[in-house]
Amino acid sequence: MSANFYKKVGYKIKVIDLTHTIKEDMPVFPGTYTPKLIPANSYEKDGFKETLLKMYTHTGTHIDPPAHLYATRTTLAQFLASQLMMLI
């Protein structure tokens, strides 16, 4: 369902941004490595700037679906965005 639907039926929509900024010195799950931000291309050499990002999937903000632990369970792609919203 879209945010407009919820507004029409009387719910207030409030977005709480839980995003963590990815940086090399951020906290990570114990036993894993911190992200690596490696210069890959530069304006001077390549005409554009690009960075290679190397990190574990459990770094920063993420959601673990049931398929993370159980092979036959629901994957993240099978969830609707509305299932990840809290209505107030």
Image (cartoon, grey):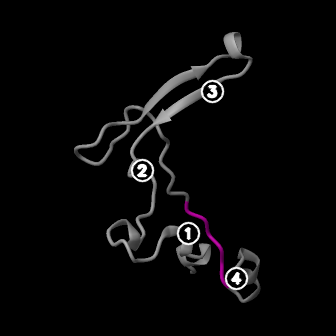
Find numbered disc 4 in the image and state the secondary structure of the residue it sits on. helix
Q: Position of residue 85 (x, y in %)?
A: 56, 74
**Residue at point 55%, 57% (across, down):** 17
Q: The residue under label 3 is which amino acid type?
A: Glu
**CB of mark 3 within 8 Å of CB of mark 4?**
no
Find numbered disc 2 in the image and state the secondary structure of the residue it sits on. loop
Q: What residue sits right under mark 3 in the picture?
A: 50
Number of the label disc, if any, that sits on residue 6: 4
Mark 3, mark 4: which one is toward the viewer? Answer: 3
Q: The residue under label 1 is which amino acid type?
A: Ala
Separation (CA) of disc 4 from disc 1: 22 Å
Q: Position of residue 52 (x, y in %)?
A: 53, 30
Q: Quadrant of the N terminus?
A: bottom right
**CB of mark 2 within 8 Å of CB of mark 4?**
no
Q: Nearer the viewer, residue 41 or 16?
A: 41
Query: Farthest residue toward the bottom?
Result: 9
Q: What residue sits right under mark 1 in the picture?
A: 77
Find numbered disc 1 in the image and state the secondary structure of the residue it sits on. helix
Q: Which callout, 2 or 4, points at the residue further toward the start of the chain?
A: 4
Q: Is residue 58 left or right of residue 39?
A: left
**Residue at point 74%, 83% (across, down):** 5
**CB of mark 4 within 8 Å of CB of mark 1?**
no
Magenta stretch in the rendered image: 11-16
> Magenta span has 12?
yes
Mark 2, mark 4: which one is toward the viewer? Answer: 2
Separation (CA) of disc 3 from disc 4: 39 Å
The prevailing secondary structure element of the residues shown in magenta is loop
Number of the label disc, if any, that sits on residue 57: 2
Separation (CA) of disc 2 from disc 3: 20 Å
